[in-house]
């Protein structure tokens, strides 16, 4: 496939992924509302987040080895199909016994396994279809689509959960997965040749080590991974407590929760639009570091505001969305540029695992944090740490020199 036709080819992928993201955003927000209002427990939200992330973090590095071996388009198709089946199973659980949280956590864990294959495969196809100088633009457009879904999804999810039981709302995710799968039949994604070795345990471990070396032999990239891991350790617990901050500290309800989700999406749309439409000349490493600082500041200020300052909290949330969007797009583009295409599946899988695993510790203590120090105080502490990560990264020479070398 000619890379000069990349935009037309990627358009089919974007259409399918947007429908899938929109439906998933609506369903995820509906589940968050259902859990928040049904259980009103930070621990329940934390366990749900762990169930949705931990399996992906554990098997992710091994999944990456197979993503680099298999046809990445087929990986995305089968992963999407598996996730849809798990969601369909969850509808039956909620119809028969909506309080059986063990089965709900189990099915969320199964969905996470599908994501362990789908998410890295999706990120790894970009360098196969897109010229290198367009990767940041593609990342920006990806963030735009995610942002639009983040804006419309909570509104759709709130509307759905208001008029339908949670079991019926989940069907939206199944429909989105079907559309995403159908869109992939309209594109051709190159399949990179691999070694003829069968994927035995020694071979898998050897190829996993090669993926790790692609990161850690590049000192700047390794340090950037480390900083992202520390930041995520703080961001994840705070992210799932946004609804609790809205309900508890600011005295909101369903619609206030929707406003916060929507404004976060608006911010991400602004950030993604900036990268997707403008010609950005600023170093991507500088963007990553600056957005860490900006995001941390928004967290800290959101926890510091008095309970009557809901509108300023909304504004800070929007700025946080801009920061997160620019950070994510810039970070993904750095990886796509620094790592050879045949190793991207392994590297993206390792990144998601390295970023997620430490955050599980934070999530496990979310209930304790909320009860012991308060949700607002947790926002302030996490914000200061994320700001510190950004500042340290600016003073790291190997990170700042990262874009001057390639893996």
Image: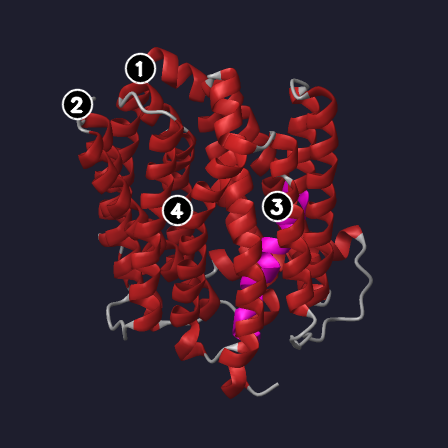
Whole-number angstrom distance, CA of label 1 to CA of label 2: 16 Å
Tell me how far mark 4 sits from mark 1, CA to CA.
25 Å
State the CA–CA distance, disc 4 to disc 3. 32 Å
Closest to the observer: 250 or 214? 250
Residue where numbered disc 3 is placed: 172
Secondary element type, mark 2: loop
Depth check, front residue: 35 or 62: 35
Q: Which one is earlier in the sequence, the residue at label 4 or at label 1? A: 4
Q: Position of residue 158 (x, y in %)?
A: 47, 36
Q: Is residue 247 above or below residue 26?
A: above
Residue identified by numbered label 2: 306
Q: Quadrant of residue 250?
A: top left
| SS at mark 1 in the image | loop
Q: Is the residue marked by circle 1 packed among few (<14), some (14-19), or many (20+) residues within 10 Å?
A: few
Q: Position of residue 237 (x, y in %)?
A: 41, 30
For discs 2 and 3, the disc positioned in front in the rendered view: 3
Residue 125 forms part of the magenta stretch: yes
Q: Nearer the viewer, mark 2 or mark 4?
A: 2
Neighbour class for label 2 at 10 Å: few (<14), some, many (≥20)?
some
Q: Residue beneath label 4, please?
A: 228
Alpha-carbon span between mark 2 and mark 3: 38 Å
- The magenta span reads 112-128
Q: Position of residue 72 (x, y in %)?
A: 67, 65
Residue drawn where x is 60% and y is 38% of the image? 169
**Residue 279: x %, y % from top left:** 27, 75
Is the residue marked by circle 3 packed among few (<14), some (14-19), or many (20+) residues within 10 Å? many
Q: Earlier in the sequence, mark 1 or mark 3?
A: 3
What residue is pinned by disc 1? Answer: 373
Residue at x 38% of width, y 24% of height: 244
């Amino acid at each position: 496939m000619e890379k000069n036709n990349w935009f037309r080819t990627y358009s089919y992928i974007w259409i399918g992924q947007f429908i899938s993201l929109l439906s998933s955003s609506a369903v995820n927000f509906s589940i968050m509302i259902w859990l928040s209002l049904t259980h009103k427990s930070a621990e329940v939200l934390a366990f749900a987040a762990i169930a949705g992330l931990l399996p992906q973090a554990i098997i992710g590095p091994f999944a990456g080895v197979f993503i680099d071996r298999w046809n990445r388009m087929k990986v995305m198709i089968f992963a999407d199909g598996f996730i849809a089946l798990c969601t369909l199973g969850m509808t039956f659980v909620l119809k028969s016994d909506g309080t059986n949280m063990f089965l709900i956590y189990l099915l969320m864990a199964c969905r996470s396994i599908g994501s362990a294959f789908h998410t890295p495969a999706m990120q790894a196809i970009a360098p196969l279809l897109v010229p290198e100088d367009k990767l940041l633009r593609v990342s920006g457009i990806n963030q735009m689509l995610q942002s639009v879904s983040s804006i419309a999804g909570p509104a759709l999810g709130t509307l759905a959960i208001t008029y339908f039981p949670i079991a019926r709302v989940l069907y939206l995710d199944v429909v989105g997965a079907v559309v995403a799968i159908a869109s992939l039949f309209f594109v051709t994604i190159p399949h990179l040749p691999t070694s003829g070795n069968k994927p035995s345990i020694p071979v898998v471990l050897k190829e996993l080590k090669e993926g790790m070396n692609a990161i850690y032999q590049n000192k700047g990239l390794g340090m950037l991974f480390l900083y992202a891991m520390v930041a995520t350790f703080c961001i994840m617990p705070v992210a799932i407590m946004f609804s609790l901050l809205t309900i508890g500290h600011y005295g909101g309800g369903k619609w206030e929760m929707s406003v916060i989700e929507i404004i976060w999406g608006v911010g991400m749309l602004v950030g993604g639009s900036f990268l997707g439409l403008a010609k950005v000349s600023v170093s991507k490493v500088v963007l990553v570091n600056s957005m860490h600082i900006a995001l941390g500041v928004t967290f800290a200020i959101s926890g510091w505001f008095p309970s009557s300052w809901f509108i300023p909290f909304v504004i800070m949330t929007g700025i946080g969305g801009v920061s997160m969007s620019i950070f994510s797009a810039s970070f993904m583009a750095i990886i796509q540029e620094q790592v050879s295409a045949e190793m991207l599946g392994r590297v993206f899988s390792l990144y998601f695992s390295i970023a997620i695993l430490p955050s599980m510790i934070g999530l496990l203590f979310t209930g304790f944090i909320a009860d012991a120090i308060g949700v607002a105080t947790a926002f302030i502490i996490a914000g200061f740490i994320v700001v510190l990560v950004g500042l340290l990264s600016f003073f790291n020479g190997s990170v700042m020199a990262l874009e001057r070398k390639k893996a």
